[in-house]
């Protein structure tokens, strides 16, 4: 009986060993992934035109914007003769904002936009956001008040206390 079992195991092992291994899905290359990049600008009107062109503008500063670019958009930006540069962590700025709300439905809308909600104080949401979120919230009719232009400044002030 042991011999028959052993022969059966060897036969199955041989049978499965001869089959071609299933092909694994190819890992997406870095070039196929969206990339977060900096585009120097000379005026904020260019930032608005990039947003209107459908680019995913995350941050708008006086002299640069930070955008999330799909590979096809990268080429389109280069064709616009705009330099696309790597960015530093300091350039990926998030704001601290307060947004008046009228109820849970408003809070849910803001959360669904991707805001990092810190707290809800009565009728006000306090959140950490990219400029992209501010644009989207304002488009929905919310009034956004920027409390701190860079949330990292809060930590710096706290560290000095």
Image (spheres, rainbow, N blue to C red):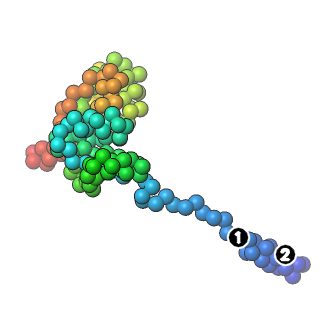
Q: Nearer the viewer, residue 159 or 42?
A: 42
What residue does disc 2 label?
Answer: 8
Front residue of this view, candidates 117 and 93: 93
Horizontal side of 140 relative to 9 (left or right) equals: left
- Residue at horizontal 60%, vertical 63%? 24
- Look at discs 2 and 1 and give the one toward the viewer: 1
Gap in angstroms between the C-alphas marked 2 and 1: 21 Å
Picture quadrant of residue 122: top left
Which residue is rendered at x = 21% and y = 48% of the image?
40
Q: Is residue 72 above or below residue 107?
A: below
- Depth check: give the residue in front, 27 or 143: 27
Q: Position of residue 85 (x, y in %)?
A: 26, 54
Whether 136 is drawn above or below 35: the answer is above
- In the rendered image, is residue 76 in sight? yes
* Residue on which the image places disc 1: 20
Spot occupied by residue 150 in the image (x, y as percentages of width and height): 19, 41
Q: Earlier in the sequence, mark 2 or mark 1?
A: 2
């Amino acid at each position: 009986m042991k011999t028959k079992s052993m022969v059966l195991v060897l036969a199955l092992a041989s049978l499965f060993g001869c089959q071609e291994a299933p092909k694994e899905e190819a890992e997406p290359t870095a070039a196929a992934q969206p990339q977060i990049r900096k585009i120097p600008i000379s005026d904020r009107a260019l930032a608005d035109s990039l947003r209107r062109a459908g680019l995913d503008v995350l941050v708008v500063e006086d002299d640069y914007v930070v955008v999330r670019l799909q590979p096809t958009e990268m080429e389109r930006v280069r064709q616009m003769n705009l330099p696309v540069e790597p960015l530093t962590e300091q350039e990926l700025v998030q704001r601290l904002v307060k947004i008046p709300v009228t109820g849970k439905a408003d809070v849910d809308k803001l959360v669904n936009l991707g805001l990092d909600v810190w707290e809800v104080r009565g009728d006000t949401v306090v959140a950490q956001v990219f400029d992209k979120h501010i644009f989207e919230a304002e488009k929905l009719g919310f009034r956004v008040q920027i409390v701190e232009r860079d949330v990292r400044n809060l930590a710096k002030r706290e560290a000095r206390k």
